[in-house]
Amino acid sequence: MSFPGSPEGAATTGLDSSPFEGRPEVLDALPPLTEQARAEAREIMARYPQPRSALLPMLHLVQSYQGFVSPQGLTFCAEELGLTTAEVAAVATFYTMYKRRPTGRHLVSVCTNTLCAVLGGQRIFDALKADLGVGHDETAADGSVTLEHAECLAACDYAPVVTVDYEFYDQQDVDGARELVAALRRGEKPLPSRGAPLTDFQGVSRQLAGFSQHADEAAARAAVDHPGEYGPTLAGLRLAADRGESAPPMPRSEPAPAPDRGEPRETVRPTGRTGETPGREAADARVAAADTPAEKAGAAESHPDTGTEYGRGRPQKQPRGGTDTPAGTEPGTSGQAPGDGKA
Ligand code: FES
């Protein structure tokens, strides 16, 4: 049986309530989040109008230095962004790409979602588990590989799919996947089926943080231009070309009209001069500015005074200290005066 919070439970339910971990000796040996890391974090923050928007790439940056989101990494992000560590942890625990315990040199993800599973993904996962002696989200004793089961990796036309550090190894079978992982453990980096050549988990984390993981511009360009095989994805296109078929032309599109929400054409700001609350004043203005009966009805409908037949019978301000709402219609009463105590 799998319990929420356990690795197997998380694999089953998608819920992982386990804490950010690391034995003290592991945490002590982690590479520090240096001044360079701080400078890079600030470079990421400068890319966004609101610094807190930088949190996701900053968590990848932490992983590029330390291999996972360590407790120090949570504090680092919180300090830089002016957030609490609870807020940072809330984000980091939501996404499975952020790891809570040290990750191996490579992250091997096996898709066990429906299509991949029926085509052999589950058998592949089970075989790798046995070879590595680990379960979901666990790392082999030699630190070479962390294994995880993954939900759909968005490559169903290549099922069953395995990724290493998010690079694709398509149409795997049990033997091919076992050989792939054995090669990783020997320190080799087999070429992915498509996309850039393999680096490692910390390298790709740097890339995801928005920095190049390659030594220079030429190496980065070579990775981008690396040839790949896109057969299954392009099969429909080839078939259409063989048959001389092409997609019908797109109809000339006119700019879509703005959705009609019963609001005036221009924003009407409350002036604060009418003695009403800003919300009421704005609602009055929306009704006044509506120029069709439908717009007027929509604006009246959303007016705070709806239900009192807007525009007539507007309730007058009540003097301080009292309300004439009859007991029983006031929220929280049941027709009883306070302290009545009658059954
Ligand atoms: S089901 Fe495996 S990639 Fe979609």
Image (tube, rainbow, N blue to C red):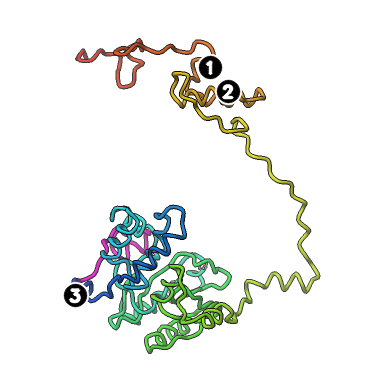
- Residue name at image x 44 percent, y 84 percent: 180
Q: Residues within 10 Å of mark 1 (few under 14, many from 20)?
A: some
- Residue 264 in percent (x, y) is at 60, 30
Which image quarter is the C terminus in?
top left
Range of magenta residues:
1-23
As drawn, is 187 to the left or to the right of 173?
left
Element type at marker 3?
A: helix
| 1 or 3: tag closer to the N-terminus | 3
As drawn, is 310 to the left or to the right of 104?
right
- Residue 130 in percent (x, y) is at 34, 79
Mark 2 vs 1: CB contact within 8 A: yes
Residue on which the image places disc 3: 25
| 2 or 1: tag closer to the N-terminus | 2
Camera-side residue: 187 or 182?
187
How far apart are the alpha carbons under marks 1 and 3?
70 Å
How far apart are the alpha carbons under marks 2 and 1?
10 Å
- Residue name at image x 55 percent, y 77 percent: 195
How far apart are the alpha carbons under marks 3 and 2?
67 Å
- Residue name at image x 34 percent, y 66 percent: 38
- Residue name at image x 30 percent, y 18 percent: 333
Quadrant housing residue 299 = top right
Residue on which the image places disc 1: 310
The disc labelled 1 sits on which kind of residue?
Tyr
As drawn, is 187 to the left or to the right of 291?
left
Element type at marker 2?
A: helix
Residue on which the image places disc 2: 287
The disc labelled 3 sits on which kind of residue?
Glu
The disc labelled 2 sits on which kind of residue?
Val
Q: Nearer the viewer, mark 2 or mark 1?
A: 2
